[in-house]
Image: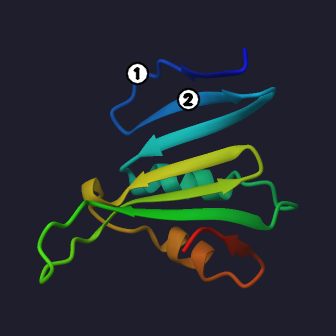
Amino acid sequence: MAMGIVDSQLRSNTHKTYDVHFFGDSIHTTVTHDPEVVSRWISDLDSDKRIVGLDVEWRPCFNRNTSNPAATLQLCVGRRCLIFQLLHSRIVPPSLIGFLSNPSYTFSGWA
C-alpha cells in the first residue's frame, strides 16, 4: 500500500487513532480534544527522540480587523503524531506547556 489511512475504530469519546501509511512508513496518529489524552501522549514519548515537528492551524478569517484563535496543534515525534483540537478543549494541559517550553527538544515547522 503506497498511501492510506486506517482507523483504529476505538470506542472512545475522548480521542481517535489512525495509522497513516505513506510509501512504506506507518505513522500512528492520535486526534483529540481531551487534555488527559495529550498528557498521556507526551508521557509515552520515546526519550531518545528530541526533534519535534510542529504546526498550528487557525480557522479562516475573512475580516481584516478580526483574528481567530488557534484551532489545532499538530506535533510529530518519530512516527507518532498528535493532533490536539484546541478549539474544543476546556484547557491546555500543563504537561503540554512544559513540553513546548522544554529546551531539550528542537521544534521544526513551516512559517
Q: Residue at x 52, y 32 (%)?
A: 17
Element on which disc 1 rests: loop
Q: Residues within 10 Å of mark 2 (few under 14, many from 20)?
A: some
Q: Amino acid at mark 1?
A: Arg
Q: Looking at the picture, does residue 98 appear above or below residue 95?
A: below
Q: CA distance from mark 1 to mark 2?
A: 13 Å
Q: Where does residue 23 sit, x and y in percent of width and height? A: 77, 28
Disc 2: which residue: 18
Direction from residue 106 to residue 65 in the image, left or right: left
Q: Where does residue 63 sit, x and y in percent of width and height? A: 11, 73
For the residues labelled 1 and 2, say whether their Cβ atoms are less than 8 Å apart.
no
Of the image marks 1 and 2, the number of the one nearer the N terminus? 1
Q: Which mark is residue 67?
A: none
Q: Residues within 10 Å of mark 1 (few under 14, many from 20)?
A: few
Q: Amino acid at mark 2?
A: Tyr
Element on which disc 2 rests: strand
Q: Residue at x 60, y 83 (%)?
A: 101
Q: Where does residue 79 sit, x and y in percent of width and height? A: 74, 43
Mark count:
2
Disc 1: which residue: 11
| Colour treatment of the image | rainbow
Residue depth check, mark 1 versus mark 2: number of the one nearer the observer: 2
